[in-house]
Amino acid sequence: MSSRVLHANCNQQQAASAARHRCICNAASKDGYKVLVLGGGSGGSAVAAHYCRKLGKDQVAVIDPSEQHYYQPMFTLVGGGLRSLQDATQPEGQVLPQGVAWLRSAAAEIDADSSTVTTADGRRLRYEYLVVATGCQPKWDSVRGLPEALGDGRVVSNYSPKYAPLTFEALKDLKQGHAIFTMPKGTVKCPGAGHKVCWLSEDYLRRHGRRPAVKVTYVTPSARVLGLQRYLPTIERITQERDIAVVPSTHLVEVCGRQQEAVFDCLDASGTPTGQQRVMHYDLLHVTPPHVPAPAVANSSLADAGGWLAVDKETLQHLRYPNVFGIGDCCSLPTGKTAAAAAAQFLVLRDNLDALMAGSLQQDSAAKYDGYTSCPVVTRQGRVMLMEYGYDGVIMEMFSKLGIDQSQEQYLMWLVKTLVLPAAYWALMTKGYDARSILQLAP
């Protein structure tokens, strides 16, 4: 193809993107919307797309300050050097549907009694129905010294688009010493990501002949490396065969960057500090931070005692405000905070909010969310163990009906993780369709 044609195609794409951008921005002149969505991430974009199609132009608004939309499940592969951050990124203006009012600000105050939301730049918006999809955010300052040390070439974390690429840079530079991977107490977004970075980093060191010179340690506040019994034997086998030291009942409380030391509290069986501490020297330290809800939710009447959005765990409708629904990581749901969970929740929210709009939502006939989530645990390059479960740890595996043992590492699951799920996310979920339908295996 000639450079002239390439240049013309580029100009056409830029013009189309600009026109789409104007369409989204110009719709933001109203002060009230039928559906107001807080957050334009996984759940928020799906909801916005569905209701733009259902209600038409200028009926739906999304409040989100982010210019970029990230497929966060890919951050593990970015940190492992198997994908670039660009592979996990699209402009938010291209992800949100035409006809949505995109207000590029954060929600500052939610007044559910008056059905209004005030943005950080001072706009006050009315809504008929509110969908909260504000996610959760890492609390870096919960560990003393971590904000100062993070990104220094040795202290890294896959839990941020800013720092995930630095994980691989630090891994490439690690020739010998001690690599430590931590999990925290409390709520964590995608808990499996703290596992994956450990196994994938160890695999990289092994493939590049450095493993004998590097000690690998996984530190967890739990008594065991994994909570789900079905998948535990595989993870325990991996740690033993690959000589990964597991330190249980231990919680990171301080990072001393200059000394390259990590300070941990030792915990008793209830998770309470015993008063004893443990100090470990590191040459690479990957920190999984605890996560907290967005302040606008935590400080509102929508929150439960922990600051999370108080929704019915089956219908996703708010417990006190019937015109409010929640989706994704912001919700007080006893299941994993993952994109897969948000995809399953979207189908329930969609059906129940549609029924509420039609005046036909009844508790006994409402769509019910069963807690489904999945976690593709990358155990090494080319191998994944796909964990799928619901409330109370009930196993909900979709591939087992094909005779595939999902409690073991599988190449097929690697293909699902690296090819199928990203395609389903961009083409289906963010467009407000059933992302699980691409597998043709949904129960």
Image (cartoon, rainbow, N blue to C red):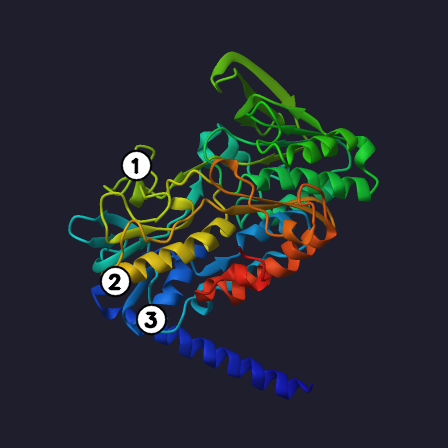
Q: Which mark is residue 304?
A: 1
How far is mark 3 from mark 1, CA to CA?
31 Å
How far is mark 3 from mark 2, CA to CA?
11 Å
Mark 1, other Cα within 10 Å: few <14 / some 14–19 / many ≥20: some
Q: In which quadrant will I find the N terminus?
A: bottom right
**Secondary structure type for disc 3:** helix
Mark 2, other Cα within 10 Å: few <14 / some 14–19 / many ≥20: few
**Secondary structure type for disc 1:** loop
The residue positioned farthest toward the front in the image shown: 364
Which label sits in the foreground, 1 or 2? 2
Residue 200 sits above or below residue 182 on the image: below
Q: Earlier in the sequence, mark 3 or mark 2?
A: 3
Q: Position of residue 39 (x, y in %)?
A: 37, 55
How far is mark 1 from mark 2, CA to CA?
26 Å
Q: In which quadrant of the rendered view does residue 43 lie?
A: bottom left
At label 2, the amino acid type is: Met
At label 1, the amino acid type is: Asp
Asked whether residue 64 appears in the rendered view, the answer is: no
Mark 3, other Cα within 10 Å: few <14 / some 14–19 / many ≥20: few
Between 141 and 436, the residue placed more toward the observer is 436
